[in-house]
Amino acid sequence: MSVASRPVLLVLASTYPRWPGDPEPGFVHELSRRLTDRFRVIALCPHAPGARTAERMDGVEVVRYRYAPRRWETLVNDGGIVTNLKRHRWKWLLVPGFVLMQAWRAWRLCRSERVDVVHAHWLIPQGLIAAMLGRMSGRPLPFVVTSHGADLYALRGRPLQAVKRWVLRQAAAVTVVSRAMTGELARLGVAAGRVEVLPMGVDMTARFRPDDSVGRQPDELLFVGRLVEKKGLRHLLDALPGVLRERPGVRLTVAGFGPEEPALRAQAGRLGLDGVVRFLGAVPQSELPGLYRRAGLLVAPFVEAESGDQEGLGLVMVEALACGCPVLAGDVPAVRDVLESDAWIVDARDPRRLAERIVAVLGMPESERQARVQALRDAALARFDWSATGRRYGELLERVGG
């Protein structure tokens, strides 16, 4: 099917790669590019300093809308919208322009490109914009809305809850990235039959895969993720002295960046961990497999943030398992979509318990640990590899747009 004859899919997103190799989360683009065999895909996302306003990436037509003077376009990156609004109250001034300009550009694209179906990532504001587009364009415009977690868990004020209920009623289909999120949707009045659990994916066949030529370092702990409250790195740092008492050779590599980095570095210094913890900063996706293949254990100490925000899924766990790396995760509901056994889950807010569990996993016989990892990897391959998730999203969007 030629590009001109394919139906047009408009993807609305907040988080999107600013350029190839951007260390910001790229799951929306990874899905979008896997839909280009079925659709002409146009992704509308916010502009950021250093990014182009329009370009083609992997077959996706990326349009980045301006919403403020260039140096102030900082609402999305380096921590995410919820975190940025919490840490910098003045950024609330950016929100009206952020929403209105995306709505304006989406409406113009719908008119000029004859969009057939919309995929809105996040209930607010993208879901709201998608719900309004049909009325603004004067013709039916079906849309799928996908919640990734923060939009569902953190935005809890009564007016925002009302907006989310309205968006969910208007959507032709609703997806969430983990089973745990269906309960939250039920509390918003969404019938279970209207919700599909469709996670984002991981490239488990080409990029994230084992490599026996890389030697695994049994005492190397790895943390991968944004340096924000819900990722829980400060709890892992609190637990490290207890780990070191049992295994003095343990070292921690931190791959990630975000607004809490200065505080976390200071915490590591206070705890006497300067020679133990290595902060790598932003790491491109292409370099992550090497970290997973070398580490003895990925620790993902997820917690529920003060705002209520928590992980919608936690794809770093899948990436690690895909590379043969054991995983220990904080006890938030979504992790059970990946780690079905309590042996790999712990209350990360309890530093003593977290330290004990890290020591226990590191002390497992290698054969037993790798057998468990292989079983988890096999289960994850059928559910999380892009070959499966991309196909399921493509079929859903074709059904809705047909």
Image: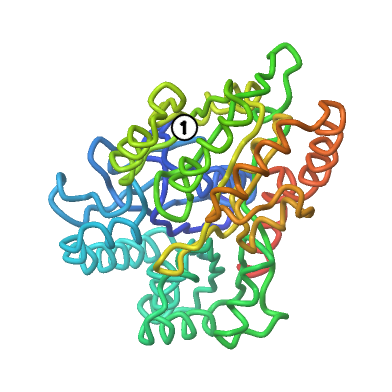
Q: How is the image coloured?
A: rainbow
Q: Position of residue 303 (x, y in %)?
A: 52, 58
Q: Residue at x 58, y 35 (%)?
A: 243
Q: Quadrant of residue 204?
A: top right
Q: Residue at x 53, y 70 (%)?
A: 143
- Seen in the image, is 283 located left or right of residue 400? left
Of residue 327 and residue 172, the one placed in the foreground of this image is 327
Secondary structure of the residue carrying numbered label 1:
strand
Q: Residue at x 48, y 50 (%)?
A: 232
Q: Position of residue 266 (x, y in %)?
A: 30, 37
- Seen in the image, is 277 located left or right of residue 38? left
* Vertical arrangement, residue 295 with respect to residue 349, above or below: above
- Would you say residue 338 is visible in this rendering? yes
**Which residue is at the far top?**
213
Of residue 100 and residue 401, the one placed in the foreground of this image is 100
Q: Residue at x 40, y 44 (%)?
A: 227
- Characterize the local packing of mark 1: few (<14), some (14-19) or many (20 or more) Cα atoms within 10 angstroms: many
Of residue 309 and residue 185, the one placed in the foreground of this image is 309
Q: In the rendered image, which residue does mark 1 sit on?
A: 255
* Vertical arrangement, residue 238 with respect to residue 10, above or below: above
- Seen in the image, is 91 located left or right of residue 134? left
- Would you say residue 322 is visible in this rendering? no
Q: Position of residue 231 (x, y in %)?
A: 48, 50
Q: Report the quarter where the N terminus lies.
A: top right
Instruction: Specify the amino acid type for callout 1.
Output: Ala
- Seen in the image, is 292 located left or right of residue 51? right
* Vertical arrangement, residue 31 with respect to residue 397, above or below: above
* Vertical arrangement, residue 39 with respect to residue 21, above or below: below
Q: Position of residue 38 (x, y in %)?
A: 64, 50
Q: Quadrant of residue 135?
A: bottom left
Q: Report the quarter where the C terminus lies.
A: bottom right
